[in-house]
Amino acid sequence: MARVKLQDVAKLAGVSVTTVSRVLNNRGYLSKQTINKVHQAMEELNYRPNAVARQLYKQRTDLVGLVFPTVNNPFFGQLEAELETRLYELGYRVVMGNSQNNPGKEEQYLQLLFNGQIDGLIVGAHNEGIEAYHNTNLPIVSIERIVSKQIPVVAADNYQGGCLATQRLLDAGCQHIIHTNYPATLATPNQERRRGYEELMTKYGREKLTYEISFDLPDDQKAGKRVPEDVKVIGYDGASSTRLLFPDLTTIQQPIPEMAQAAVDLLQKRLAGQAVESVTLPVKLIPGLTG
């Protein structure tokens, strides 16, 4: 059976090919009667619009790339799910990529954007030295990562989180408080947690002990200590799966749904060519039994 063409729909509906195209792409004023005639003709002929042709006509793909270190991390897993839900509601499909600390993978997604194969990019991977980020005004939004001056960042208030966690342990009578964070060379807003911790430790005359760890590829660590009897622990992120598995963990909770919404809002503005600024959202302490 021959493929049904746009001309066949136009003939059956009694309108021009241009009118059928305008109905398909929702462009210009058309009467309800005309729209109904075109849709009825499409249904009778079982016509399916050519998605590639429509994308070329609109000069958009309705695809957005998401690049994060790994979905095995509860924070990134929930964040990607929240982003996908919100983008789907706006008519976008997503292309997800886990960089796994491989800058080559991240550069591949940038190339998709340069080539017009995706409309925008939301990134949160921790690869450094990717020059392409500094030479573009393309629609890119970053989450919890400082990429370049041109790219807006959505971040939780990491300074507030560092202060809340440290104050909680100080109030509990802890004498030796250790802070773990990404390496200081990594350009990410969560370095502000360290500043909050160190400022409070200095204020209270305590020794500052910061351990730099790569959390993207975590190792299991066991020290034979009991929590909270021997050591108190305060977590960070407060992802839903973490709260489900470790309900007793005292944690600083980042507003993951709100961060996803802010990133999507910024991306839409960038797609529309509007000027945008970075966004910082508040965190809160969720009390538990561990700290």
Image (cartoon, rainbow, N blue to C red):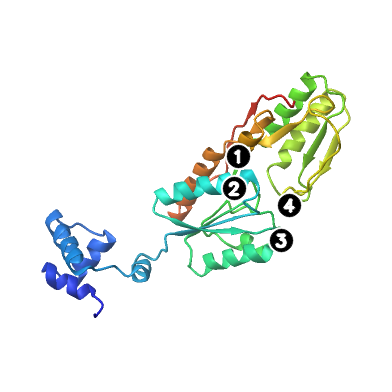
Local crowd at mark 2 within 10 Å, few (<14), some, or many (≥20)?
some
- Which residue was labeled with disc 2? 77
Q: Which mark is residue 129?
A: 3
> Going from the N terminus, do you reach mark 3 or mark 4 first?
3
> Going from the N terminus, do you reach mark 2 or mark 4 first?
2
At horizontal 45% and vertical 57% (from top left) the residue drawn is 93
Q: Amino acid at mark 1?
A: Ser
Picture coordinates of residue 61, whole percent (x, y): 42, 63
Q: Is residue 46 left or right of residue 208?
A: left
Q: What is the residue that sits farthest to the bottom in this orientation?
A: 2
- Which residue was labeled with disc 1? 241
> What kind of element bears circle 4?
loop
> What kind of element bears circle 1?
helix
Report how far apart the C-alphas of labels 4 and 1 lie in the structure: 18 Å
Report how far apart the C-alphas of labels 2 and 4 lie in the structure: 14 Å
> What kind of element bears circle 3?
loop
**Foreground of the two, 248 or 95:** 248
